[in-house]
Amino acid sequence: MEILCIRLQQSKVTSLLDEGIQIPEGLRVWTSSLGDSRIFSRRKDEKEYALKQIEGTGISMSACREIALLRELKHPNVIALQKVFLSHSDRKVWLLFDYAEHDLWHIIKFHRASKANKKPMQLPRSMVKSLLYQILDGIHYLHANWVLHRDLKPANILVMGEGPERGRVKIADMGFARLFNSPLKPLADLDPVVVTFWYRAPELLLGARHYTKAIDIWAIGCIFAELLTSEPIFHCRQEDIKTSNPFHHDQLDRIFSVMGFPADKDWEDIRKMPEYPTLQKDFRRTTYANSSLIKYMEKHKVKPDSKVFLLLQKLLTMDPTKRITSEQALQDPYFQEDPLPTSDVFAGCQIPYPKREFLNEDEPEEKGDKSQLKQQAKLISRRKQSKSPELSSAWRGFRASSSTIKRQAGQDLIVQHVLIATDMFQR
């Protein structure tokens, strides 16, 4: 998908869309490479919006769900969808969002680069606490409304820059979100294009058939650890990903290398996991006898008796039935001690992070993301002839993200998908 970030009054955006998105003369334009292309147009004293273009003349299933959800959900820590536009002149669909200048992926990368340059600058602990609290608050709202996000990772956690909502966290990208009070199909059956495994809960890697709120909590624990260390806690190579099979040896190996192999008493239902026989065959408990979250975090100067570690441990509990909930986490003693979390994660300080619009155009992507994308492209290519409506929509969604594949679809498909978006989301 292409994202156009335009600083214009909302009425002018509507006019632009009616004209097929023509950039007015005299406005300065920048581009950056954050995986998508972006155009920035600036005018003084006018609100900044993000226009997300759904490429092609069809809408993927994930876009339908995102539209249906965001039209209903309203919370300070969930990105606000202002409008949905259909441009009949070029048969394109646009989503208008408030624009956030920062995201956690780039904030963490900023600090990781300082470590690489031998001038380590950790995220301030007060900022980490405020970020985590707001993420939990937003997710608690989603869970209270029976919504699972299912794609929590640093790139999907936005942070507002200068302005009325300075330092406010915005949870974004609801394309993989699901209602969890309805029967759900296995993850691999629904989503042939799957995000990085680094934030995926162990029960999903072992083939769990049912989703619970605990999968989002595990991902938040991964993000929390990354904020504390500036490194992805469960980073692993992605070359052998097979999206049709939830079991991923290297990802589980990385989790066990950090956490240790789960004892039967700590996760009693692990034997009921569909991939448990494969786990028994491929892994030996003794291999990870010296591994523990305590040892991993001590290397990063986080003490095992600190409130920050105790909360992290609750978020990264292997057994999903014992994992802390978002409501419980918000009441944790960690948030009761000074410094208290604030609504501005930058806490009135100068923002040191570059705006996303000014990032280096040659900025490389994560190697893991690239290799995973290649593997997923191969898998979906083999499936694209499938007659399944859901898989066909997923294929269209994947094609929309690739500039190398020509787009094919009818104009009627746009209207059809938009009209039935809410119904499809209920599935």
Image (cartoon, rainbow, N blue to C red):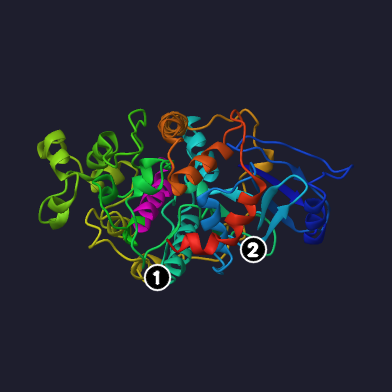
Q: Is residue 222 magenta?
A: yes
Q: In the image shown, does 375 or 28 lie closer to the viewer?
A: 375
Q: Quadrant of the C terminus?
A: bottom left
Q: Is residue 164 above or below residue 206?
A: below
> Number of numbered discs present?
2
Q: Is residue 160 above or below residue 194?
A: below
Name the spot of residue 381 as percent of width and height, x first.
Answer: 45, 31
> What is the magenta range?
216-232
Principal secondary structure, stretch drawn in magenta: helix
Q: Is residue 130 magenta?
A: no
Circle 1: is it few (<14), some (14-19), or many (20+) Cα within 10 Å? few
Residue visible at 45% across and 66% down in the picture? 142
Whether pointer 1 and pointer 2 mark residues with C-beta atoms closer than 8 Å, the reply is no
Upstream in sequence: badge 1 or badge 2: 2
Q: In the image shown, does 350 or 265 lie closer to the viewer?
A: 265
Q: Amino acid at mark 1?
A: Gln
Q: Is residue 256 above or below residue 210?
A: above
- The residues tagged by marks 1 and 2 sit, at their Cα atoms, a distance apart of 24 Å
Q: Amino acid at mark 2?
A: Glu
Name the spot of residue 191 as percent of width and height, x first.
Answer: 41, 46
Q: Is residue 388 above or below residue 367?
A: below
- Element type at marker 2? loop
Q: Which residue is mark 1?
A: 336
Q: Which residue is mark 2?
A: 165
Residue visible at 24% across and 44% down in the picture? 295
